[in-house]
Amino acid sequence: MEYGTKQAQFRTFPANSPEGVDPTHQRRSANYKPNIWNYDFLRSLNNKHDIEEGIKERVEQLVEDVKLMFAEAVDSLAKLEMIDRMRKMGLSNLFGNEMKETLETVASTNYFTMEDHVYASALRFRLLRQYGYVGSQDALRSFKEGSNTLNRSNCKDIEAMIELFEASHLALEGENILDEAKAFSTGILGERVSGLDGPLSKRAVHSLELPMHWRVQWFDIKWQINLYEQQEDKRSNLLELAKLNFNTVQATHQRDLVDISRWWRDLGLIEHVDFTRDRPVESFLYALGLAQEPQLSSLRKSLSKVVILILVIDDVYDLCGSLEELECFTGAIIRWDSEQIQQLPECMKVCFRALRDVTYEIAYDITKDEDWHRVLPHLAKAWADFCKALLTEAKWDHSGYTPSLEEYLSNAWTSSSGPLLLSHAYFFVGHMKLEDVADLLEKNKDLIYNVSMIIRLCNDLRTSKAEIDRGDAPSSVMCYMREVHVSEDVARKHIKVLINQAWKSISSHCFGNTETPFLRPFTDVTVNAARAAHMLYQFGDGFGIQDGSIGKQILSTVIEPLALD
């Protein structure tokens, strides 16, 4: 294969650099810490839950037991609670028919006792929307009618507020009742959370930190299983099935991570680009956030490679190249031509060659050696658009120019890497002819735009200070501060408003869109890109700092299986 030859050539390049376009340019440093994930440790991962004798038979037996539990649920509310529990614990794929039939029945009725009304209506509304039904916001109007008699210390009413809060985050544009529900439930939970204890307190804090609709479900499953295990009324069969299912799927993810770690070691790129972030495990975690299903290993591994290279190329523009060098580098990527890089520093040469070779590799993987040359232009264009957007930011940086927020965002949604990632993802989950790809991506541009905006804005909220300290181009926070002459706190609140608006636009693509059901896998992966960004930047810079919350997330989600009784 041509790629194998190219890769072998790539690894023989010397580390010493010839004179570049601008030999006087001072390379910056972001002082990134070395990679903390040891290759030998990753290679030793040994979760055997998917191959141990008897596991498959035990899962099949438990599935039948849980189906009986589902059938025993006596009313609509009990069935909805069962569906909710299955979904939270990662079992939706095992009970698809039962859940679909129940939701279709529930969608045609809306009757609950007044005692359960706000809680049950919010639960019903949320589940229906999560499974694609639009539903009317009027179903939640009752929270206003009962707000004056709400017992704010009553646990059942607190449960209702948690459900109302979660349901409100599935709002579409113009749904004012849901906006009011969000403000109302947020206020009550904020007042009461410090006085709660036990599982109810944990649920309230968890929701307020990040609502369910904004979370990658797979990253939340272990937390939900542990919470369920603390309940007095837990069902042992359901709990065992959830644990076995999690460990079995996790075993596939571990094998994928080992493959990516081996690939990154063998590529040898990091030896030539010591200024960049060496983050293969974090990159895999982000790719896992987009696609968790065991059968999507090829997509996960290809996206991991893309994310790894995104970090490297982004650091080339932020830290390594002079403006003249970056213009030359961008031109080479636009033309996909290695002849243009001959006068560049060696670190930029090897980055270009690695990018070209890995893109060939992914194109081969997508098509299984058939028509790879027809896929390649789409992937190359996505990289060219990404690099052009990075070059625009580099020009702003070098000239000291601060754009307006609108001008910044018109470029930043592309530099976020969202369009680049999703252009690659489409080929693994889309089911259209190659000649229709450009048309499909254009028709879904609004969805990709809003997801990319969330990636960018979540990133900016957590990394803007460090980037300002390094002297990088302004982020959305700084652009808004300077444009409107407001404090950083006010600017951050505005950015959060933009994130909320983007989620409403995204939701319009998620609920009730039955015109192109074959695109549902692409939509799911796309929306998960926004959710994964929330995870990555929820408590800090997930790519820059390894030993914080992201390290714990990796251990929990990928490394450590659930203990079985």
Image: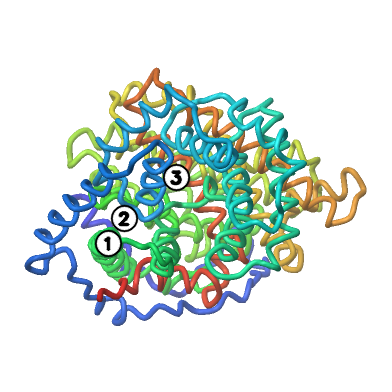
At mark 1, the secondary structure is helix
Callout 1 amino acid: Asp
Question: In the rendering, at what x and y percent does residue 324 appear?
Answer: 64, 52
The front one of 495 and 60 is 60
Mark 3 or 1 closer to N-term? Answer: 1
Callout 2 amino acid: Lys
Q: Residue at x 33, y 38 (%)?
A: 376
Numbered circle sitting on residue 421: 3
Is residue 410 something that shows in the picture?
yes
Name the side, left or right, on which 202 lies relative to 261.
Answer: right
Mark 2 or 1 closer to N-term? Answer: 1
Q: Residue at x 39, y 72 (%)?
A: 14
Marks 3 and 1, Cα distance to the nearest angstrom?
A: 18 Å
Question: In the rendering, at what x and y percent does residue 544 appear?
Answer: 57, 69
Marks 2 and 1, Cα distance to the nearest angstrom?
A: 7 Å
Mark 3 or 2 closer to N-term? Answer: 2
Pointer 2 with pointer 1, Cβ within 8 A? yes
Pointer 3 with pointer 1, Cβ within 8 A? no
- Residue receiving disc 1: 256
- Residue receiving disc 2: 301
At mark 3, the secondary structure is helix
Is 324 located above or below residue 501 in the figure?
below
The front one of 333 and 459 is 459
Question: In the rendering, at what x and y percent does residue 557 appear?
Answer: 39, 66
